Image: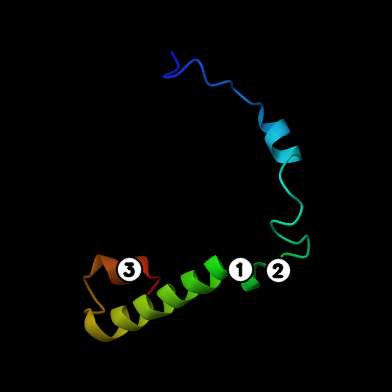
Amino acid sequence: MRKNPEIPIIPINLIIHTMPDTFLAPKGDYKNLIAFQKTECIYDITLFFVEHYLPKIGDRTVDQMGY
């Protein structure tokens, strides 16, 4: 049972076909997106913290960072 039956169900193919073409260039120019740049910065800061302040063995966070 749906929580709110008054909201219509829109087929996914209609959603995909109505998305603006300017969201992401076909060439995959994702590195210029502000969200990507901020995420990359946060990752770099986290990596620095993990490398300098956490023990290399036995810490789950270090394992999840790919060491």
Q: Name the residue under label 1.
A: 33
For the residues labelled 1 and 2, the Cα–Cα distance comes to 8 Å
Q: The C terminus is located in which quarter?
A: bottom left
Point out residue 48 in the picture as x, y percentages from the top left corner: 35, 83
Q: What residue type is labelled 2?
A: Asp
Q: Nearer the viewer, residue 20 or 65?
A: 20
Residue 50: quarter of image: bottom left
Residue 61 left/right relative to 26: left
Q: Name the residue under label 3.
A: 63
> Up-down: is 1 above or below 30?
above
Q: Disc number at residue 60?
A: none
For the residues labelled 1 and 3, the Cα–Cα distance comes to 29 Å
Q: Do residues under tags 1 and 3 come within 8 Å of each other at their CB atoms?
A: no
User: Going 27% across and 86% down the picture, which residue do you hit?
Assistant: 52
Residue occupying the far front of the picture: 6
Residues packed near mark 2 inside 10 Å, few (<14), some (14 to 19) or many (20 plus)? few
User: Going 51% across and 16% down the picture, which residue do you hit?
Assistant: 6
Q: Do residues under tags 1 and 2 come within 8 Å of each other at their CB atoms?
A: yes
Helix, strand or loop at disc 2? Answer: loop
Q: Mark 2 points at which residue?
A: 29
User: Going 78% across and 65% down the picture, which residue do you hit?
Assistant: 27
Point out residue 42 in the picture as x, y percentages from the top left corner: 41, 74
Q: Which amino acid does label 1 sit on?
A: Leu
Residue 46 left/right relative to 55: right
Point out residue 45 in the picture as x, y percentages from the top left corner: 37, 80
Residue occupying the far bottom of the picture: 52
Helix, strand or loop at disc 3? Answer: helix
User: Going 71% across and 39% down the picture, which residue do you hit?
Assistant: 16
